[in-house]
């Protein structure tokens, strides 16, 4: 059994996320997708990031991905209260 390369996986995910962000609320057979405004924005960002990864060659070093993840984790932890107030208002 062969495995898909990372670039193919990110390409498929990018197209799916962009499809979700464009369609928004839709019903596909027995699956209902209703992401809302924040979900559509997040799907758009993830789709563009996935496709950018693919088109830039997929040569992003793992150290950069870890640094980005650590930065986002620290930013979320530092701003948790303000984010919580924003989403609960």
Image (cartoon, rainbow, N blue to C red):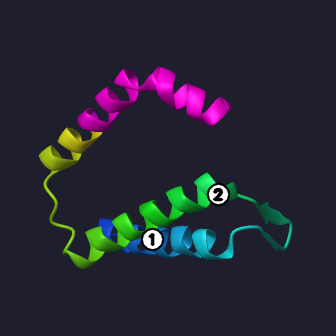
Mark 1 lies on residue? 14
Q: Which residues are magenta?
A: 70-89
Q: Quadrant of residue 78?
A: top left
CA gap, disc 2 to disc 1? 18 Å
Q: Is residue 4 visible?
A: no
Horizontally, residue 83 falls left or right of residue 39, namely left
Q: How many callouts does the rendering have?
A: 2
**Sooner in the amino-acid sequence: mark 2 or mark 1:** 1
Percent x, y of residue 14: 45, 71
Mark 2 lies on residue? 37
Image quarter (top left, top right, bottom left or bottom right) of the C terminus:
top right
Percent x, y of residue 11: 40, 74
Please tell me which residue is depicted at 43% across the width and 62% down the height of the picture.
45
Helix or strand or loop: what does disc 2 sit on? helix
The question of residue 20 being in magenta is answered with no
For the residue pair 69 and 37, the one nearer the viewer reads as: 37
Percent x, y of residue 56: 20, 74
Magenta residues, dominant SS class: helix
Horizontally, residue 32 falls left or right of residue 14, namely right
Q: Residues within 10 Å of mark 2 (few under 14, many from 20)?
A: few
Q: Is residue 22 visible?
A: yes
Please tell me which residue is depicted at 21% across the width and 68% down the height of the picture.
58
């Amino acid at each position: 059994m062969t495995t898909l390369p990372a670039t193919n996986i990110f390409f498929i995910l990018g197209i799916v996320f962009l499809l979700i962000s464009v369609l928004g609320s839709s019903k596909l057979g027995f699956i209902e997708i209703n992401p809302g405004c924040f979900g559509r924005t997040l799907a758009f960002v993830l789709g563009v990031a996935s496709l950018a990864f693919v088109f830039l060659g997929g040569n992003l070093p793992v150290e950069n991905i870890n640094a980005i993840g650590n930065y986002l984790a620290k930013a979320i932890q530092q701003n948790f209260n303000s984010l919580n107030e924003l989403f609960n208002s």
